Image: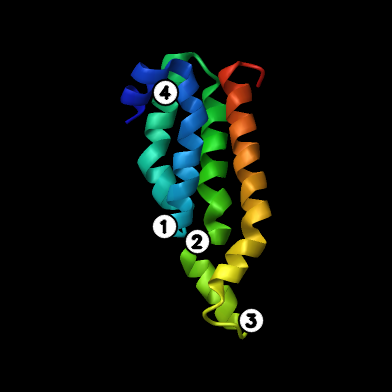
Amino acid sequence: MARGLFAALGRWAIVLTPIVSAASGALANSGSVANGLFMASQVSLATEAGLNAALVMALQHMAALSLQMVSPVRMSIVCSLAGTPGREREAYKAMLPFVVAIVAVLLISSFLIAIRVL
């Protein structure tokens, strides 16, 4: 996957991969899955693109963990504990600004890494 993205986008592939990791973290309710699947390819991508591998690994880890808070499992648990089972849609609506902020931080961070500011 990393090779294909690198072949198609060059160092700009680093901008897309954190979003894939964040989505995986949200769906799996764990950063371990995304880190296990993508960390090696992220390091390979960073090395091939001449980017700071430590920053890319940190971004990967942050991305994988960042959207866990809105995983379907967690939202169901939160609504159940709050005494509002079945109102997950409302909880997602309340969390949307936080999700947008997280995605923005991930995109900005990855862009700064790609242009070698960080």
**Where is residue 72 shown, x and y percent of the image?**
47, 65
- N-terminal of the pair, mark 1 or mark 3, is 1
- N-terminal of the pair, mark 2 or mark 3, is 2
**Where is residue 35 shown, x and y percent of the image?**
43, 44
- N-terminal of the pair, mark 4 or mark 3, is 4
- N-terminal of the pair, mark 2 or mark 1, is 1
Q: Which amino acid does label 1 sit on?
A: Ala
Question: Gap between marks 2 and 3, in whole Å?
Answer: 16 Å
Question: Gap between marks 2 and 1, in whole Å?
Answer: 7 Å
Question: Gap between marks 1 and 3, in whole Å?
Answer: 22 Å
Q: Mark 1 points at which residue?
A: 28
Q: Mark 2 points at which residue?
A: 71
Q: Name the residue under label 3.
A: 82
Q: Which of marks 1 and 3 is in front?
A: 3
Q: Which SS class for mark 2?
A: loop
Q: Mark 4 points at which residue?
A: 45
Question: What residue lies at 49% left-to-right and 26% top-to-bottom?
Answer: 14
Q: Which amino acid does label 3 sit on?
A: Ala
Q: Are marks 2 and 1 in contact (CB under 8 Å)?
A: yes
Tell me the quadrant of the picture where the N terminus can be found. top left
Q: Do the residues labelled 2 and 3 touch (CB within 8 Å)?
A: no
Question: Gap between marks 4 and 2, in whole Å?
Answer: 27 Å
Neighbourhood count class around disc 3 (C-alpha, 10 Å): few under 14, some 14–19, many 20 upward: few
Q: In which quarter of the image is residue 85?
A: bottom right
Q: Which SS class for mark 4?
A: helix
Question: What residue lies at 58% left-to-right and 77% top-to-bottom?
Answer: 79
Q: Which SS class for mark 3?
A: loop
Figure coloring: rainbow
Q: Nearer the viewer, mark 4 or mark 3?
A: 3
Question: Gap between marks 1 and 4, in whole Å?
Answer: 23 Å
